Amino acid sequence: MSTEISVPQFDAWIKSLLDIEGFGGIDSSMNGVQVDNDGSPLRKIAFAVDASLETFQRAAADGVGLVFVHHGLFWGSPLRVAGNHRGRIKFLLDNNICLYAVHLPLDQHPELGNNAGLAELLGLKNVEPFGLYHGRKIGYKGILTVPLSIDGAVKKIDFMGRPPLGVFPFGKAENKTCAVISGGAADEVRQAIDEGIDLYVTGEASHQVYHECLEGRINMIAGGHYSTEVWGVRRVMERCAAELHLDAEFIDVPTGL
């Protein structure tokens, strides 16, 4: 049977799991509560990658009180509350839905994070932090338990059978080492080359790294920004259901990107 908690209690629980404060000076995302509710207790929580109107509409139809997302509505400088941005906020307020966002702390978390999820899917061992970003390492690297071809790696990380955005097969036929950074981290392939990594996995493809991969003789998979960032959201969802005993659901709204 599901229980209920308040938004401040959920906020405290998340902050006990994820290093929200530690990324305060690094992450442009407003991590934490972005749109509050009226204080009503939460009985059902939805988890999604992006804060979009479709996500909110599906959450409202399912009686959700809080939506936890990786990509929220507020980034860096304030946005004028107009147009689509106003429409999303208005829908949340009209339906008394709280919006909670966690960006880099979810990418980086060694157990619940997007990158930890990718590393586990690929079967990495001897896992170490990788990918320096403003003084913090966001991703992970390690040794593949079983050497993988680039096609074999694609099959391990796909979500719902969705194809990757790009595959750059310029390295070894069998990969023994791998580094992962989910989302938009194509340029970080240079760090993987510098460290002698066989295979680099990220979300987005980038025109300018094509020749870097070719000349650096590295394999790279751009699995999709969305598809590489479902893993952390789903892991937090599973932990929420297990520890808080709340009804929880994943709302899948793929962008194809």
Image (cartoon, grey):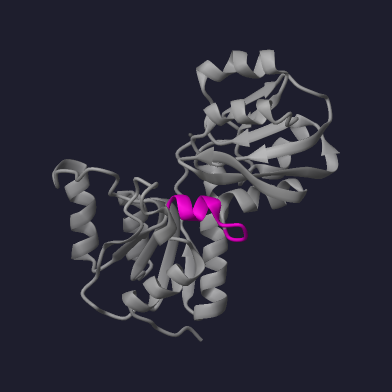
The single residue placed furthest to the front in the displayed view is 135
In the rendered structure, the answer to whether residue 96 lies left or right of residue 13 reads left
In the rendered structure, the answer to whether residue 203 lies left or right of residue 126 reads left
Q: Is residue 90 magenta?
A: no
Return the x and y of residue 32 as percentages of the image width and height.
35, 61
4 versus 89 height, above or below:
below
Where are the magenta residues, as a range? 103-112
Return the x and y of residue 68 as percentages of the image width and height.
40, 61
63 versus 105 height, above or below:
below
Q: Is residue 108 magenta?
A: yes
Residue nearest the viewer, comparing 162 with 24: 24
Residue nearest the viewer, comparing 154 with 27: 27
- Identity of the residue drawn at 34% across and 51% down: 72
Q: Quadrant of residue 172?
A: top right
- Identity of the residue drawn at 65% across and 31% down: 192
Q: Quadrant of residue 13?
A: bottom left
Q: Quadrant of residue 148?
A: top right
